[in-house]
Amino acid sequence: MASSERQEGILLPSVNGKTRILGVFGFPVEHSLSPAMHNAAIAALGLNYLYIPFSVLPEDIGPAIRSVVSLGIIGVNLTIPHKERVLPFLDRIAPEALAVGAVNTVHNDNGQLVGYNTDGEGFAGPLNELGFGLRGKRAVVLGAGGAARSVVFRLARENAAVTIVNRTLERAERLAEEARIATDFVRGGARVSCLDFCDRAGLRDALAGAELLVNTTSVGMSPHDGDLPPIPPQAFHPALFVYDLIYNPRETRLMAEARAAGCRTLNGVRMLAWQGAAAFEIWTGVRPDVCVMEAAVEQQLGGR
Ligand code: ATR
């Protein structure tokens, strides 16, 4: 065995004939933090489950997800590139996942595959825990990709006023329109507008009146730790909460500058733990300790 494959000091869980299987389908899946996070929650609760990473090629998602039923797997998470591709293979899809158009959690409910999206809960949970409710807030969201979708849909559902700021404006406009349509039940209509990433004056004005700034782009992610989204100087103000979904590094340059200006800040570790906790509860019916999951993520990140 190559030394890189050998793991020191890992205690094997006691697997037996009654052990129930959970897992994550991804490609690549090697860097997923979910196995460590979920197995820590399982161990803390003393449950007889095991969470396993499965490397599933993009073209194999159909047979792989149907095998969840034939193998009696209780549930799986889905990560890149499966979150959208999996939809046609499911029996039922929860409303939030259907609206977002992406599934990150599948539950084998007595042979029926049910898709959920817990990313919105992962995003909102840590804010609520800190006493920061989203209802009616004014928010600026940087980015319009996959991560932005769950964030924008959740904000729109909470009747927040959202400004999506993206390098590719058409992509932001498409997401804004989808969020408006998906949340047309919101009284007064969803309030979603768009800005070009380079519109510094527009961004300055939007941030001046905002209570929340969310970075969903990869700008500032390791190894480009020094990069900063083009936020105009003086745009940070102490009433602005800055939430960067990046967790490597733990404090991005965006967060550091915001903190220096007196803003409250949060990175993506809690979001990861909260979306995981919501999935875990769907599968097992037990609410895990989100702090245990967060500590497991931190431990994994310690070496990165
Ligand atoms: P994810 O699923 O992580 O959101 P994605 O769907 O590829 O990944 O979306 C990445 C987001 O980060 C997009 O909004 C992208 O902007 P574009 O739509 O213009 O591509 C944004 N992004 C990535 N790198 C960027 C950069 N260097 N500057 C500005 N925006 C960037």
Image: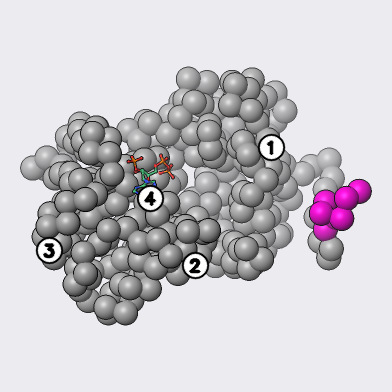
Q: Position of residue 238 (x, y in %)?
A: 22, 76
Amino acid type at mark 1: Phe
In this view, the residue in front, 283 or 202, is: 202
Between marks 2 and 4, how big is the CA–CA gap?
15 Å
Residue, disc 1: 54
Q: Secondary structure at mark 4?
A: loop
Tell me the magenta residue range: 1-7
Q: Is residue 69 among the parts visible in the rendering?
A: no
Image quarter in which the C terminus is found: bottom right
Q: Would you place residue 133 above or below residue 81 in this image? A: below
Q: Earlier in the sequence, mark 2 or mark 4?
A: 4
Which of labels 3 and 4 is toward the front? Answer: 4
Q: Please, what is the three-letter code of the amino acid marked with disc 2?
A: Arg
The yes-or-no answer for disc 4 within 8 Å of ligand 1 is yes
**What number is the disc on residue 217?**
4
- Using a 10 Å C-alpha cutoff, classify the residue at mark 1 as few (fewer than 14 neighbours), some (14 to 19) or many (20 or more): some
What whole-number distance in Å separates the C-alpha atoms at marks 3 and 1?
Answer: 45 Å
| Residue assigned mark 3 | 209
- Check disc 4 and give the amino acid type: Thr
Q: CA distance from mark 4 to mark 1?
A: 26 Å
Residue bearing mark 2: 250
